[in-house]
Every structure is written in C-alpha cells, then in structure tokens.
Amino acid sequence: HIILKKRDKKNKYLYGVCDRNFNTIVPIEYNSFEKNVIGFGERDDWSWDVKNYIVSKEGKYGILDTLFTTILPLQYDAIEVCKNTYIVRLNYKYGVLDSDFSTLLPVEFDWIYATYIDDDHDNNNYIVKKDHVQKLYDEKGRLISDFYIEKRDREYDDEKDEYVEKSAFEPVFEPNKTTLSAYIEYYLDGYYGIIDDATRVVIPAKYDKIEYLGNGNFACIKDESSFLIKDKK
C-alpha cells in the first residue's frame, strides 16, 4: 500500500491510503498517519513490520490495523506508543492501554512516564503522578510503590565542599531540633511537601520552603508569600 498526502484549503496535509494500482483504500481525510513498526533494528537484515497505524482527525487520535480497520476509535487527544502498550491522553488526563486496548491504568493521572527496566525495552514500569503524588506501577498495571520519587539531582554541599546525592525524602524534627516528628518532607518537581509516617499527604508538594512549627502546624512559603497550614488529621 501507499500512504498518500495532499494539502487542504488551509495548506495543511491530509492523509489516506491507496493500493499499488492507486485504488483508494482509505479516503484522504486524516490529519496524521503514522506507522507503528516492530522489529526495526532487532533483526540481522534490519527489516521491520507494521504493527498498526496511529491516526488523527480533527484533533482526536485512534488506531487502525494493517487492513486499515479502526481498532481503537478516534477519541483521545494524544497516543504515545510504548513497546507493547499505549499511553493515552484525554482532557489533560493520562492512562495506559495494553496491547489489546484494554485499560491497564485508568485515564485519571496528571502525568505518566514509561521507564524501561531492561536494555531491549521489552519491559517497562510506569511512573504516574496525581495530586502532587507519584506512584510506580509494573508493566501489568500492578502497584509497586504507592509513593515513588526518582532520586534528586546532585546538589552542592557547602559543608562538605562537594556535590552530593540528595534524597527526595527528609525527616522533619520537632521545634527543639533533636526529636523526630511523625512527618517527612518530600521533594517533587522543584517543590516541597509533607507526608506523615503512613504516607498520607499532609501538604502537597507545591511550596518553595516548609518549616515545621510543632503541634501539626507548618509555615509554608511560595512566591515570597507565607502560609500557615495545620494538619487536619
């Protein structure tokens, strides 16, 4: 088959498909038409096969099989292809579909990232973010960690005069600075938040600085403004 493209009245491309005799197989009506290939670079002859086609029309994405039959309706705002799964976006929320287009992770997350766990990219885990909390799921959609944050970048330690690895989690002390409290400070996407010892989010990670004042009270600073927040537990 041949993928065709032509310019529309707005000088943008539209795509369709014809056979080798230029008989129309798919009308020229899609805004994008991308091959999802398998096997490229994995074989000695560098050959590859088309698994399906990721297409879009009027801002919505779906999937056609190799016979150009719709196997995933055009209903998503975006589709990202992983090895055997698909990360989809709808109304600014993300989810994951498996190879049969069944829901692996529901479309309810603010952000999803596939992190591969082997060199061949055959298996991957998913880091998801929702309500200022990140979790880690395996390739089957099973929860691995209900509070997961990748390590922070190295930071310069003035006392040690060197760069050191910083943990995303730091203990919170009582105001006397010697007794540990039941709280933990966490760092996510450049901001600080607070969880308790049961990983309940007390304060979401959206503040530039947080200081514990005791008795469940926290002084939080954001954009040079200060807030007093109390644990409502």
Image (cartoon, rainbow, N blue to C red):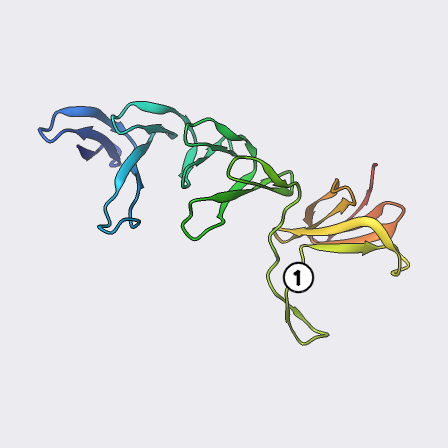
Residue 32 showing in the rendered view? no
Give residue 77's quadrant in the image: top left
Q: Is residue 89 above or below residue 113?
A: above
Q: Is residue 165 above or below residue 48?
A: below
Q: Amino acid at mark 1?
A: Lys
Give residue 142's quadrant in the image: top right
Query: Where residue 144 sits in the image (x, y, percent)?
Result: 61, 41
Per the image, the residue denoted by label 1 is 166
Query: Where residue 123 sits in the image (x, y, percent)?
Result: 46, 44
* Extreme-front residue of the structure: 44
Instruction: Identify the residue shown where x is 85% and y is 51%.
Output: 181
Instruction: Identify the residue shown where x is 49% and y is 49%.
Output: 117
Q: Is residue 233 left or right of residue 190?
A: right
Residue 28 showing in the rendered view? yes
- Give the quadrant of the N terminus: top left
Query: Where residue 106 sits in the image (x, y, percent)?
Result: 54, 29
Give residue 198's quadrant in the image: top right
Query: Where residue 136 sits in the image (x, y, percent)?
Result: 59, 42
Q: Is residue 6 above or below residue 163?
A: above
Instruction: Identify the residue shown where x is 52% and y is 43%.
Output: 125
Q: Residues within 10 Å of mark 1 (few under 14, many from 20)?
A: some
Q: Is residue 113 left or right of residue 184?
A: left
